[in-house]
Image: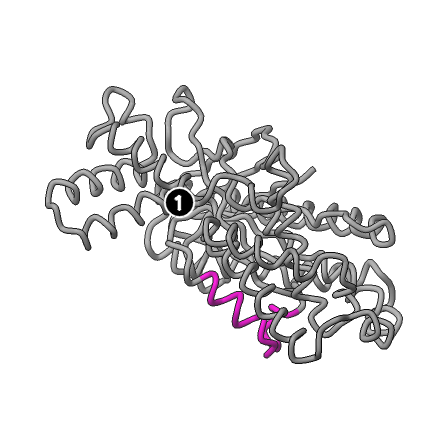
Amino acid sequence: QRRAQQEMPYTSTEIDLLGLYLSAVKILFVSGALAELHELVKWIEPLRISLPLHMTTVRNEAAYYSCVCQIMRANTSGDDAASIMPTHGDCISSLLAAERAAGGDGGDSADKLPPQVRRSRRALLKADQSGNAERIERAERRVERAHCIYVLGDSHSLAPAWHWVTPKLGDGGDDAAPPRRWLLCPQLVTGCKVWHLRPASKFFTKENFASRLSAIPRGSHVILMLGEIDCREGLLLAVEHVKYRDLDAAIAAVIDIYIDVLLAIVDTYGLNVFVHPVPPVLNETRAFVKIFNQRLKERVQHEIEQERERCYAVAAAGGGGGWQRRYDDEPVLVDVARERCSNAPRHEQQQRRHAGRGGGGRGVAAAHH
């Protein structure tokens, strides 16, 4: 840091001010205000280029800024960080135009669309006919939510942000229908570990995680991206401090917390949850990240099998329980396994909620290598 101070042309106050600008870039990116972000990056780049910000008090803010700029550059053929991917506004404008062109019924293919999309399209048509600006705005937000997959997690949730994808989610449409396009919307929880989400935790990331969950509409698809910070910072340190007998025991403890969080999300928030593997981004941690991912995959599949058995038990008792399982191969969601028990009677759903299991037609899925 002393060397950084010698090379830095700014005072400590000016560095703090630059940190605020860098934070604004992160906030604009996760909020989808990409047009405004372009302009801000143009002003910041000359101020921070070639400076050792990673050795100052704003190193975290600088790291997020660099991450956002790299994501932006990766989606353009140019070198300018400000001339990047289409803005969020452009994406949504195109989506709204397509929905309006489809009309309220969507033609012959309307019955192949998921109910959420059909309802949002009808609401948009009625709002346009009413001419009420506030009603139109609400209907447009509803259309947006019906076409979003939310990516909830640590900083790795930024990489896929604001991309259009066409995964097969088994969300109620006809398999013969054309692939449905989804917009990946980030729900960033900075610095979140799985360990922070345990019941005894009072760390601020736990509250931020709950806040991001509350902002996601019920019935939405959510990709969870957690665990990389646990693998990088927590597991080995816990073993070194003899909190666990070995690495396997430490991994098992974290995955127990993760599974409890997954089931609570399904139960409390009514979301369709996909579990993304921990990205093996560091050479130093790649070996036990792969172990962590394998253990996580096994536990998620175990929960899926348990849910299937419960659904079969409900059906055998005359409750009309239903079960659906899909395996799809997509670039974004690989080997998707889905469990649903949507037609279980109310008392069975309540029993699953009390037992910490998901109900109400929602499920947990695994997106793994």
* Residue 272 falls inside the magenta stretch: no
Indicate the position of residue 330 as horizontal and vertical percent values.
Answer: 58, 30
Nearest the viewer among 70 and 236 is: 70
Task: Name the dominant secondary structure of the magenta segment.
Answer: helix
Res. 335 visible in picture: no
Badge 1 amino acid: Gly
- According to the picture, the residue beneath numbered tag 1 turns out to be 89
Identify the residue at horizontal 86%, vertical 68% (top origin). 239
Identify the residue at horizontal 72%, vertical 67% (top origin). 59
Q: Please state if 105 lies on the left or on the right of 86 as rendered.
A: left
Q: Name, please, the residue furthest toward the left.
A: 130
Nearest the viewer among 17 and 196 is: 17
**The C terminus - image quarter:** top right
Identify the residue at horizontal 27%, vertical 26% (top origin). 110
Which image quadrant for residue 232?
bottom right
Indicate the position of residue 366 as horizontal and vertical percent values.
Answer: 60, 43
Q: Which residues are magenta?
A: 196-213
Give the vertical position of 357 relative to 171 (above or below): below
Give the vertical position of 146 relative to 157 (above or below): above
SS at mark 1?
Answer: helix
Q: How is the image coloured?
A: one colour
